[in-house]
């Protein structure tokens, strides 16, 4: 039997099917060992391609979100504050509030995990394929001031308005400096 992999690899690359390219040799060995049918072999390759694309989309959304560190619900200590409503946190983690256009305000004293929780909910949204942007209030205002200075304010504002979930951390922590901040 002739090995088709050397001929298929450049074609898959040309078609930008790198998930298939990366798993072709392994899946070919698997197909031979388990005597898979051609459709089953093809199905595995297609699943690999879809998984790679999904992972790439996830990584892109996560990078674009701009989170500070890797703050997830798994790393959030729910036991640190016994007054936290776990059911409500789980409800926020399912991100239905986004589809329902409900604003969420997380408030409390310093050091209680508000920032961690906000980013963790953002991570949940990214995992569900939702576009998220995370800013501190200071960084957001600086970003908008810079956009005004370069005549890109409208475009930047539209980007912020279109995102599915905009998280503004440390809101109200520092006073607004100018009328433009308002």
Image: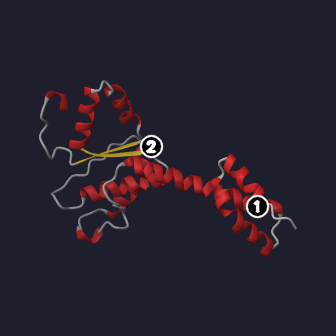
Q: Residue at x 45, y 49 (%)?
A: 61
* 131 w.r.t. 178: above or below: below
Give neighbour class at mark 1: few <14, some 14-19, many 20+ (Cα, 10 Å).
few
Q: Residue at x 23, y 65 (%)?
A: 83
The colour style of the image is secondary structure
* Relative image position of residue 24 (x, y in whole percent): 71, 62
The answer, for residue 128, to whether it is visible in the render is no
* Relative image position of residue 130 (x, y in whole percent): 46, 47
Identify the element where label 2 is drawn: helix
Q: Which residue is at the front of the view, 15 or 120?
A: 15
Q: Is residue 143 left or right of residue 74?
A: left
The answer, for residue 83, to whether it is visible in the render is yes
Which quarter of the figure has residue 18?
A: bottom right
| Extreme-right residue of the structure | 1
* 105 w.r.t. 46: above or below: above
Q: Is residue 7 left or right of residue 71?
A: right
* Relative image position of residue 70 (x, y in whole percent): 35, 61
Q: Which residue is mark 2?
A: 99
Quadrant, the N terminus: bottom right
| Extreme-bottom residue of the structure | 33
* 135 w.r.t. 33: above or below: above
Q: Which residue is at the front of the view, 8 or 102?
A: 8
Q: Earlier in the sequence, mark 1 or mark 2?
A: 1
Q: Residue at x 21, y 52 (%)?
A: 107
Q: Which residue is mark 1?
A: 5
Quadrant, the C terminus: top left
Give neighbour class at mark 2: few <14, some 14-19, many 20+ (Cα, 10 Å).
few
Q: Residue at x 15, y 57 (%)?
A: 109
């Amino acid at each position: 039997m002739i090995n088709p992999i050397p001929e298929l690899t450049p074609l898959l690359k040309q078609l930008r099917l790198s998930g298939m390219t990366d798993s072709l040799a392994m899946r070919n060995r698997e197909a031979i060992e388990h005597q898979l049918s051609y459709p089953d072999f093809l199905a595995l390759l297609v699943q690999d391609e879809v998984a790679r694309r999904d992972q790439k989309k996830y990584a892109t959304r996560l990078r674009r979100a701009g989170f500070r560190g890797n703050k997830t619900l798994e790393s959030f200590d729910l036991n640190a504050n016994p007054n936290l409503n776990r059911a409500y946190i789980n409800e926020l983690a399912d991100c239905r509030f986004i589809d329902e256009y409900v604003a969420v305000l997380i408030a409390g004293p310093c050091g209680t995990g508000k920032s961690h929780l906000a980013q963790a909910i953002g991570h949940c949204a990214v995992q569900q394929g939702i576009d998220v942007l995370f800013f501190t209030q200071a960084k957001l205002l600086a970003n908008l001031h810079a956009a005004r200075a370069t005549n890109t304010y409208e475009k930047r504002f539209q980007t912020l308005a279109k995102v599915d979930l905009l998280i503004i951390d440390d809101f109200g922590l520092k006073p607004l400096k100018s009328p433009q901040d308002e």
